[in-house]
């Protein structure tokens, strides 16, 4: 209890929870027009370890990094704004001629490395290839060469009469992104997750059937640590949907499956971690089983809490918190949009039932957040047990406007300001959200726009 | 969309509560939805649900246009005989031979993301947007791109 209190006071603004905080609109990035080009669809959002940088990846293989302005923080009217810092083409479309496979350039995940020196590093991955990018600043350049003019033209040596020593002079800040490592050809199936180990030397990449362990310095080999491919593909019953390293124990990782189970593995136990150390599964009442049961139990995201004691999973209708010490059921379950249970037939027909929602923790692990349809997103306060639904919309565009909570009416009498399930726009889905590691700043991605919300600072 | 059900008439917006009672009431709409689906697609679920979805998921991205396949399929379609496939082969072969019209149009050229440009985001005034460096066989090239 004591430790929790002192951590709370250190975290700036990490207050009571989802409902005590008043969320305000801060910024929105992206095009206004409704006609969304496929390349602009945002596919991942991630804050770096300090929260100063915010990276997004899109279907067009591009990465855009925003940086928080430092100046305004002193004035404390609002926390600094996020502005474009760097943008680059991370992945390009490829074609595997041998298998007649089109390899999408869509960025599936971005993960930041903790900062070690002046430069920033991140891993970005598409379906097949992971790349380590270095983002560095250049604010000086050498001037005063003897054999070169300032514009780069070479001087005739015979015209040189005096010698001088070139010096570094300040220049306009330039941010450069360069690919430092390319980790390729290790995945037959589509990569869904990457996770950097707490040793900061290795990382894992997971596809539908296998998980590989890499060293950040070595690109020509990786170790296979999980392989669930059956000898006969006809016997295939489940696939890996997400994987993550434990935040503190460098030997521990988890992976989730399409059947709603999570396996925790210990790399000390054996080289190939096909046998789990722990299996987390909530027992299902067989009489409740329907055609949809397995599909909606498929876990779309798994995230450890910052403390490392809990992990959170997202399936189609709910968010579950698991205590790593208890395998037989989650300790907390939060319904995201239970009203969709009576719409499963239509959601199956329009493929929405296969949407993969992500989830995230706040810095103090007291609140969890996930997205929904109609550009709604939900927050659950684990302490107060209160939840809130908010909307990412350009209608609440003025900075420091407090967002109004939204409410969905499943059926029956619809109150004023409520929206009925049948009016929800299922094309407006919030799949990707991120929470600043230290402050109450959140990044919410709609289809092609990035919204930044902050709590009200008084 | 589907018609309203007579069962549940509450407005729903809650956190986790009495799990058991809620599950029992919730499963009625789920079963009703299943019945609806089976009515529309009677052949659904003949194979175990898992394999169908999973195989489709594993094969995402499969695209090909092979003139040999195309001509064979055109000829065979007349006899309504599709080529048989081995257990390991792509299940899509023979069933969905793409035609030139089916192929997606050429992807548009690579441009800067709208998140990084446009009137709604403010690029830093004191920065040149980006430079990219490649090392090609020991020679470092630097390209300034706006």
Image (spheres, helix red, strand yellow):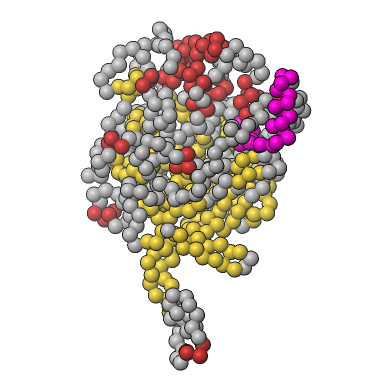
Can residue A315 be seen at all in this image of the molecule? no
Picture residue at 34% right of the left edge, 32% below the top? A391
**Quadrant of residue A190 within the rendered picture:** top right
Q: Is residue B58 covered in magenta?
A: yes
Left or right: residue A57 compared with residue B134: left
The foreground one among A380 and A64 is A64
Question: Mainly helix, strand or loop, the magenta region?
Answer: helix
- Residue A298: image quadrant is top right
Give me the residue at 65% from left, 27% from top: B96
A140 vs B138, nearest the viewer: B138
Relative to B138, A332 lies left or right: left
Question: Residue at the top extreme?
Answer: B6
Q: Is residue A424 above or below residue A111?
A: above
B60 to the left or right of B121: right
- Position of the N terminus of chain A by quadrant: top left
Q: Residue A283 falls in which quadrant of the image? A: top right
Residue A25 image position (x, y, % from top left): 29, 40
Q: Quadrant of the C terminus of chain A?
A: top left
Which residue is depicted at the point 30% across and 49% down? A79
Residue A346 % position (x, y): 48, 19
Query: Toward the viewer: A118 or A176?
Result: A176
Q: Position of residue A100 (x, y in %)?
A: 67, 39
Determine whether B30 is above or below A357 in the image. above
Q: Position of residue A425 (x, y in %)?
A: 39, 26
Can residue A121 be seen in this snapshot?
Answer: yes
**Toward the viewer: A417 or A23?**
A417
Magenta stretch: give its range: B57-80
């Amino acid at each position: 209890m004591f430790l929790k209190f002192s951590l709370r006071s250190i975290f700036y603004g990490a207050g009571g929870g989802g409902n005590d905080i008043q969320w305000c609109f801060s910024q929105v990035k992206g095009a206004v027009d409704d006609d969304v080009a496929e390349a602009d669809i945002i596919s991942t959002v991630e804050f770096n370890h300090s929260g100063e940088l915010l990276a997004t990846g899109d279907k067009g293989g591009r990465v855009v990094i925003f940086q928080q302005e430092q100046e305004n923080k002193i004035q404390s009217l609002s926390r600094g704004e996020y502005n474009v810092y760097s943008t680059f083409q991370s992945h390009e479309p490829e074609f595997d001629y041998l298998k007649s496979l089109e390899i999408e350039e869509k960025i599936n995940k971005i993960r930041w490395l903790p900062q070690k020196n002046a430069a920033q590093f991140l891993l970005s991955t598409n379906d097949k290839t992971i790349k380590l990018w270095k983002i560095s600043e250049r604010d000086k350049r050498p001037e005063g060469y003897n054999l070169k003019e300032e514009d780069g033209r070479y001087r005739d040596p015979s015209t040189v009469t005096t010698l001088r020593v070139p010096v570094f002079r300040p220049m306009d800040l330039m941010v450069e992104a360069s690919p430092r490592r390319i980790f390729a050809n290790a995945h037959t199936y589509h990569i869904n997750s990457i996770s950097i180990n707490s040793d900061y030397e290795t990382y894992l990449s997971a596809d539908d059937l296998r998980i590989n362990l890499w060293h950040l310095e070595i690109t020509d080999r990786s170790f296979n640590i999980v392989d669930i491919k059956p000898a006969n593909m006809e016997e295939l019953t489940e696939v890996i949907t997400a994987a993550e390293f434990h935040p503190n124990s460098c030997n521990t990782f988890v992976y989730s499956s399409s059947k709603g189970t999570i396996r925790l593995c210990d790399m000390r136990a054996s080289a190939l971690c096909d046998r789990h150390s722990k299996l987390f599964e909530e027992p299902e009442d067989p009489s409740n089983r329907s055609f949809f049961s397995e599909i909606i139990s498929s876990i779309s995201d798994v995230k450890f809490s910052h403390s490392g004691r809990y992990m959170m999973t997202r399936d189609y209708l709910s968010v579950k918190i698991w205590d790593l010490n208890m395998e037989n059921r989650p300790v907390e379950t939060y319904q995201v949009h239970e009203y969709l249970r009576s719409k499963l037939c239509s959601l199956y027909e329009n493929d929405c039932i296969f949407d993969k929602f992500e989830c995230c923790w706040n810095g103090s692990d007291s609140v969890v957040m996930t997205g929904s349809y109609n550009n709604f997103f939900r927050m659950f306060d684990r302490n107060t047990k209160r939840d809130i639904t908010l909307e990412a919309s350009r209608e609440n565009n003025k900075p420091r406007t407090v967002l109004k909570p939204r409410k969905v009416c499943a059926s029956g009498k619809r109150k004023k300001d409520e929206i009925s399930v049948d009016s929800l726009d299922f094309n407006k889905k919030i799949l990707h959200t991120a929470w600043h590691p230290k402050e109450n700043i959140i990044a919410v991605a709609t289809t092609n726009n990035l919204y930044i919300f902050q709590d009200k600072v008084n | 969309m589907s018609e309203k059900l007579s069962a549940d008439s509450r407005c729903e917006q809650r956190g986790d509560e009495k799990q058991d009672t809620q599950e029992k009431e919730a499963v009625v709409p789920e079963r009703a939805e299943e019945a609806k689906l089976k009515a529309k697609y009677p052949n659904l679920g003949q194979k175990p649900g898992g394999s169908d979805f999973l195989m489709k998921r594993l094969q995402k991205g499969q695209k090909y246009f092979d003139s040999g396949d195309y001509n064979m399929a055109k000829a065979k379609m007349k006899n309504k005989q599709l080529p048989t496939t081995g257990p390991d082969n792509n299940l899509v072969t023979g069933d969905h031979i793409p035609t030139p019209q089916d192929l997606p149009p050429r992807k548009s050229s690579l441009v800067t993301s709208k998140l990084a440009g446009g009137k709604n985001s403010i690029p830093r005034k004191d920065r040149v947007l980006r430079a990219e460096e490649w090392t090609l066989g020991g020679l470092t090239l630097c390209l300034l791109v706006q």
